Amino acid sequence: MMRKKDFERVFSKERITKLIDEFGAIGADPNGGVTRLAFSSYDIKAREKIIRIMENELGLKVRIDPWGNIIGRREGKLNNAASLMTGSHLDSVRNGGKFDGPAGVLGAVEAIRALNELKIKTFHPLELVVFTAEEPNDFGISTVGSRGMVGKLSKEELLNIKNNEGFSILDAIKKIGGDPDRFHEGIRKPGEIKAFIEIHIEQMPYLEKEKKDIGIVEGITGIHRAKVIIHGVAKHAGTTPMNERQDALVAAAHLIKTLNKLASTEKNTVATVGQISVKPNSINIIPSETSLDLEVRSYHKSAIKKILEDFYNEMSLIGKVYGVKTSIKDTYHTEPTTFSPYIREKIKQACDILGFSYLNLVSMAGHDANHIATIADTGMIFIPSHKGLSHCPKEWTDPIYLVKGAKVLAQSLLILDQEN
Ligand code: GLV
Ligand code: MN
Ligand code: MN
């Protein structure tokens, strides 16, 4: 199936750029960047806008599933056929960029618009999904929609999760049109989705360095997140001699350094403490409590295990050294995923048909695709990130690649559609 010529006519760089900019304006920060945290008023505005586009411009039948995922459906010629699904997320991190997430949603919009313009009716239904809360947010929880969709999250697990204002995540899901009492109805069954493909910016520098158009993602890093609490004792910062302190922040500094060192010796492995809080957080009081939110990522399961074991060990040792008490609670865990070789092959075929160069890559960022892979053949199409920057205002992808990604998506879906 040769679509190269047809595609030249119906894909538009200007149209996709305009959409990226329009969504990027929702929650734009005054000094650059975007803050469109899941469930915020900006997130809701972006959701309303995409629903309008999906219904009015693409002619999709749109519903919001019980997890708050937005799902637009384009029927196929076959009755009861499994669907070909695509999509990504529209929520952002705090002061992030305008491509992480929207590139996948708007690339899918462009692909479906192209199929409409070419009057191509597929055999399988197509589904465009905008997942709920992919990024960590005020509720401290991520990939809510995709985990919900595959049955990896439950109402019980969310029951006590609240933001700083005491608003519960279950109410937040209701606010965006979900229904926690019907969560089970939102779980997709194996066989219902024939394939899932997500376009995403690479967020790493390799495609740009190697001058390649497309990344074919071999797999995704595992992620382990945990919260460490360190209890010290608050005392006068002036009158307490240095050898009579139980300083929770000094102990935390030791642990942050330890984690950094442990990850530095493993391949394809990183670790970060990205969030800390200190009590009482006063200039002249020795810190009595610190909490550290940490994550360890690796494409190798054994590396995550080893780092955590060594870290736990260090935690137990520092108790004595600094006179503090420590505890740790796991908050998130996903195993590394290797994507379906079948889907990877189809994406490669699509690149060959379209004459695009490609590179096989492992993603060190987590994605909704990681979870969908547990119930459907899944793959990801990466497009270059300038200097590999992401989760920051300087995140940028040349619109040429937004279009290339959308074309590869459309072509891959068409190839998959020909197969049972
Ligand atoms: C998702 O953006 C991640 O944290 O990898
Ligand atoms: Mn992200
Ligand atoms: Mn993302």
Image (cartoon, rainbow, N blue to C red):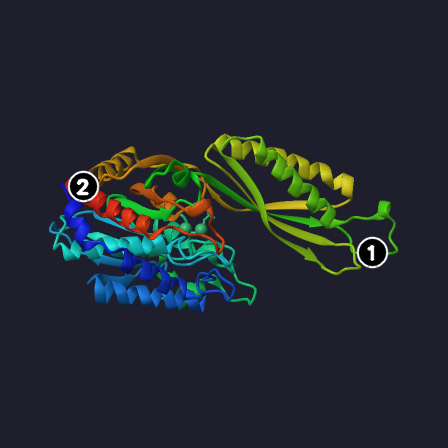
Q: Residue at x 34, y 35 (%)?
A: 359
Crowd rating for badge 2 (residues with CA inside 10 Å; few <14, some 14–19, many 20+): some
Report whether residue 193 is seen. no
Checking the image for residue 220, the label placed there is none
Q: Residue at x 34, y 42 (%)?
A: 373
Query: To which residue does mark 2 refer?
Result: 415
Crowd rating for badge 1 (residues with CA inside 10 Å; few <14, some 14–19, many 20+): some
- Nearer the observer, 231 or 407: 407
Instruction: Say if 328 sits above or below 46 in the image.
Output: above
Report whether residue 342 is seen. yes
The amino acid type of the residue labelled 1 equals: Ala
The amino acid type of the residue labelled 2 equals: Ile
Q: Is mark 1 within 8 Å of ligand 1?
A: no
The quadrant in which the C terminus is found is top left
Query: To which residue does mark 1 refer?
Result: 237
The quadrant in which the N terminus is found is top left
Measured as percent of width and height from the top left, residue 99 is found at: 39, 54
